Amino acid sequence: MVRDKTQFVCSECGAVATRWLGRCPSCGAWNSLQETQPQPARSEGKNRLAASHYAGASSAVITPLAQIETQDVVRSASGIAELDRVLGGGVVEGSVVLIGGDPGIGKSTLLLQTLDRLQRQGLPTLYVSGEESGAQVALRARRLGLPDSQVPILTETQLERILTALDKQQPAVAVIDSIQTLFSDQLTAAPGSVSQVRECAAHLTRLAKSTGIAIVLVGHVTKEGTIAGPRVLEHMVDTVLYFEGDTHSSFRLVRAIKNRFGAVNEIGVFAMTEAGLKGVSNPSAIFLSQHRDAVAGSCVLVTLEGTRPLLVEIQALVDAGGPSPRRLSVGLERDRLAMLLAVLHRHAGVATYDQDVFINAVGGVRINEPAADLAILLAIYSSLRNQPLPKGLLVFGEVGLAGEVRPAARGQERLREAAKLGFHTAVIPRANAPKSPIAGLTVHSIERVEQAMDVVRTID
Ligand SMILES: Nc1ncnc2c1ncn2[C@@H]1O[C@H](COP(=O)(O)OP(=O)(O)OP(=O)(O)O)[C@@H](O)[C@H]1O
Ligand SMILES: [Mg+2]
């Protein structure tokens, strides 16, 4: 029988195979199958199901929505404004937050700072460290200028002991650093395996909901940048945050990917300093390079992340390629790049099929919104011609396959932010053209990609 044999579980989609395969037959992910020992069938659960079936499941209570009593969610603001903003105003009682990010990006630092703030406000906290010793965490606290921190530390990796400690201590907020180091005695699989991660997260989630303890889980990320372990982890929790940024630059972004208690795609911006992460309250200009003279292949985009506009420099390098030219992108979608190059060729007559094309969003920021399209196209065009775009130019707009330039949400806000930072020329979609002039800003509104090329050639 299959159940007695070793199984292989896909870490991306949770599909089960009976033998190892290089590629998951269900979701197509490569090298994602991990060996696990099947767990013995839970006879208790089975019996419960059977018993309730025969007993007519009389205990289930069905209530109309209107008769269910509700209360507003109780939030605890940490006082770290950039993190509170991403969480929708603070940590919600009984919620589970998953925070993922590259190694060394600052997850433990931020969470220790947060717990310390909460503890100082009189809220009980608990920091469960499965990766570092108490001494290491204490050293970090000293470095962060918190030598008198009263945050209680538990160095433990066994789930059952952690659950008991949480139940006994009843902290308002607990951090588990990290979910991949935990293991449950009930399973034979190794810590970090799909079944362990899933089981541990499920138990912790249940505890959070039943006791009101807010739990923050730290999650490792895979090489591709997604949270390691089963995909279901992201469904199980209330909020998923990603820590982004280039470890070579000091700026870090915390982005909400999912939030049952607040807006998604809100970002918090931090600078990593010797004394830990400091919030950047006015981040609009941090992703701009400081070129003294205009350079070819650079175009400034105004992107709207959550509620705040950010100015980001998009860089492109177009260079003679070999027989199979490369298309590489950092911080932007590669598939979208291929599509934009096709649009550029078909509608503006600019061919790049024999060229390598590299694009990059400066500062390690990741841009997902289509309003970046026009800036990418103009950066590529500028690099190909080896002609800088006009100084003080800013661009936004989505590009369609038919070569049309579509409007971006909240265009006026983007324009005003750019004007505030000294940009004086804008190339934007016609539908975003401001009704009344914006002081200091000349706006060129366009409808098609080829017009964008014409406009930048004619502006000085
Ligand atoms: N003395 C120091 N001065 C300035 N920055 C430091 C110092 N020591 C550590 N850091 C910063 O803190 C970062 C480590 O942060 P932290 O341990 O919180 O990361 P993490 O995301 O928890 O990593 P991991 O995935 O390994 O647990 C380092 O990458 C570095 O940028
Ligand atoms: Mg850490």
Image: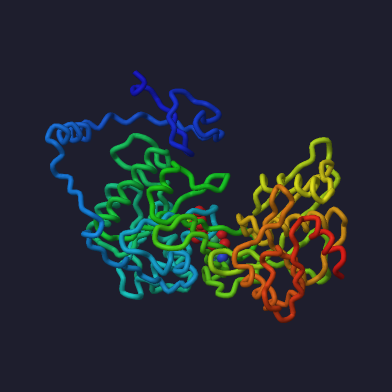
Considering depth in this image, is 412 or 300 the residue closer to the camera?
412
Residue 46 visible in this rendered orientation of the protein: yes
Considering depth in this image, is 370 or 178 the residue closer to the camera?
370
At a point 77% along the width and 74% down the height, the residue shown is 442
Q: How many marks?
A: 0
Q: How is the image coloured?
A: rainbow
Does 436 sit left or right of 92 as displayed?
A: right
Q: Relative to 169, is 290 above or below?
A: below
Position of residue 376 measured from the top left corner of the image (x, y, whole percent): 73, 56
Position of residue 344 measured from the top left corner of the image (x, y, whole percent): 78, 49
Q: Relative to 7, is 133 above or below?
A: below
Position of residue 65 measured from the top left corner of the image (x, y, whole percent): 25, 56
Q: In the rendered image, which quarter is residue 459 located in?
A: bottom right
Taking the view exactly as shown, the residue that stands out farthest to the bottom is 439
At a point 15% along the width and 33% down the height, the residue shown is 51
Considering depth in this image, is 128 or 363 the residue closer to the camera?
363
Does 417 sit left or right of 261 as displayed?
A: right
Residue 133 visible in this rendered orientation of the protein: no
Considering depth in this image, is 362 or 63 the residue closer to the camera?
63
Does 110 sit left or right of 204 as displayed?
A: right
Position of residue 460 measured from the top left corner of the image (x, y, whole percent): 87, 70
Is the N terminus in the top left, top right, bottom left or bottom right quadrant? top left
At a point 72% along the width and 77% down the height, the residue shown is 422
Q: In the rendered image, which quarter is residue 397 located in?
A: bottom right
